[in-house]
Image (spheres, rainbow, N blue to C red):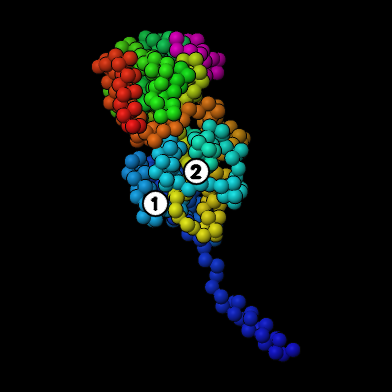
């Protein structure tokens, strides 16, 4: 008996002397700066505080081409992160370069998620052509229509509660632009007319609202899509000719036109909502504003959109324990994405998007309907953020709408230029 007790005592001592279970360290890369970066760092800090068994070790890299180049080279040498942020518009290129791992049903289960938890458009954009998932959508961010209500006071375009109304087609919108100019707006609709992103997003929205497709099965503007592209450019050109939009406005200048009260409308991403909220809070905006989904101007409800998502680089060969830790991180981020929505985004995770807390978040809740009709970039390696498609916007579309090229010629040049990239 004493011998057994001695063994048990020795065993107990051995157990006590064992080291504590090592926490899983998850290496994280993102491209988030400004307000997005501040919010993500706060989320990471909260996660680490709540999970003593998992530590996120985060690094922020330069947005755009530098980030995706770093991902490609790191995967090639087997030194990528465990998890990274990714634009869903870059998904086709990422799949072509084979830098993205597959996220299985078991992975989603480990994160306590399922595909049904997300808006269908975002899941489709995060999947390959066979339906396999390669990223988990975190948000839906789109362009919206910001409104300076002071230029519309007393008109049919504001209802009894001061909300934008009566814009159901292009004619209505152009009537509102003409009214705003008559009421003293020097740039009735501002957007980044001298910037690739601003020009492309407005063009793509108009094209999709016309029922058009930019790239189909490796062909640029096939069939009547050429005429639809020319029509979209023609509309943007008319806005310029009528003095309704600024000439060659860089991004910051286009925002300043609205925040300084010179524009009645502003077409830009939801990511500028914090700018407006902050200025309103500080009482430096000077007018009553709102933000709504881009109205159906051309016949179909659609708006350019993209998503930040979480992806796992290919070839990481992580242990099952590390993989589970990574999916725990992703699942927690999705469930806590209300804090991310403060940046103007719409949560891609429907339980948060449908929550009472989000429905009280304005103006997000007002334009959140766009999640159902979000129009993602074509499934092509030459489309997406910082791609040849964006280059075409600044090199062809912007000059055309400023009068240096006929809209039809511009559409033909877009087809020729982009098709050569697909050969």
Where is 51 relative to 421, above or below?
below
Task: Give the residues drawn in magenta, as a range.
Answer: 155-171
Cβ–Cβ under 8 Å for marks 1 and 2 = no
- Please identify the dominant SS of the magenta region: loop
> Badge 1: few (under 14), some or many (20 or more) residues near its Cα, within 10 Å?
some
Nearer-the-camera pick, 10 or 116: 116
Name the residue tied to disc 1. Answer: 75
Gap between marks 1 and 2 measured at Cα: 15 Å
Q: Which quarter of the figure is the C terminus placed in?
A: top left
Nearer-the-camera pick, 362 or 128: 128
Where is 398 relative to 376, above or below?
above
- Mark 1 secondary-structure assignment: helix
- Rendered residue at 27%/16% (across/down): 405
Q: Which quarter of the figure is the N terminus placed in?
A: bottom right
Where is 80 relative to 221, above or below?
below
Q: Is residue 255 left or right of residue 318?
A: left
Residue with the most extreme bottom position: 2
Residue 95 visible: yes
Magenta span has 169?
yes
Looking at the picture, how far across and down is residue 234, in whole percent? Answer: 35, 14
- Rendered residue at 47%/57% (across/down): 317
Which label was assigned to residue 134? 2
């Amino acid at each position: 008996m004493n011998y057994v007790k001695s063994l048990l005592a020795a065993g107990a001592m051995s157990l006590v002397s064992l080291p504590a279970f090592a926490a899983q360290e998850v290496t994280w890369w993102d491209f988030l700066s400004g307000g997005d970066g501040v919010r993500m760092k706060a989320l990471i800090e909260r996660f680490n505080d709540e999970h003593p068994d998992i530590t996120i070790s985060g690094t922020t890299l330069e947005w755009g081409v530098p980030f995706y180049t770093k991902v490609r080279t790191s995967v090639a040498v087997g030194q990528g992160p465990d998890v990274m942020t990714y634009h869903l518009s870059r998904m086709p290129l990422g799949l072509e370069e084979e830098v993205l791992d597959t996220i299985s049903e078991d992975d989603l289960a480990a994160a306590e998620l399922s595909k049904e938890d997300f808006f269908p458009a975002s899941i489709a954009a995060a999947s390959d052509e066979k339906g396999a998932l390669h990223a988990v959508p975190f948000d839906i961010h789109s362009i919206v229509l910001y409104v300076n209500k002071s230029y519309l006071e007393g008109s049919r375009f504001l209802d009894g509660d001061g909300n934008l109304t009566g814009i159901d087609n292009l004619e209505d919108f152009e009537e509102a632009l003409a009214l705003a100019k008559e009421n003293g707006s020097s740039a009735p609709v501002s957007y980044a007319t001298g910037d690739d992103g601003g020009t492309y997003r407005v063009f793509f929205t108009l094209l999709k609202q016309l029922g058009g497709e930019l790239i189909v099965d490796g062909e640029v503007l096939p069939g009547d899509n050429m005429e639809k592209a020319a029509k979209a450019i023609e509309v943007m050109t008319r806005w310029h000719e009528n003095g309704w939009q600024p000439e060659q406005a860089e991004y910051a200048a286009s925002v300043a036109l609205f925040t300084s009260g010179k524009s009645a409308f502003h077409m830009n991403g939801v990511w500028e909502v914090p700018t407006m909220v902050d200025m309103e809070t500080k009482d430096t905006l000077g007018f009553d504003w709102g933000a709504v989904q881009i109205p159906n101007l051309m016949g179909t409800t659609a708006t350019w959109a993209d998503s930040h998502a979480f992806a796992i680089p290919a070839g990481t060969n992580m242990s099952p324990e590390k993989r589970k830790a990574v999916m725990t991180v992703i699942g927690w981020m999705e469930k806590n994405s209300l804090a991310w929505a403060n940046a103007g985004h719409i949560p891609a995770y429907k339980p948060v998007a449908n929550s009472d807390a989000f429905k009280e978040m304005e103006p997000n809740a007002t334009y959140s309907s766009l999640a159902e009709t979000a129009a993602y970039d074509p499934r092509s390696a030459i489309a997406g953020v910082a791609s040849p498609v964006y280059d075409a916007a600044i090199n062809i579309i912007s000059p055309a709408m400023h009068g240096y090229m006929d809209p039809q010629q511009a559409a033909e040049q877009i087809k020729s230029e982009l098709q050569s990239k697909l050969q």
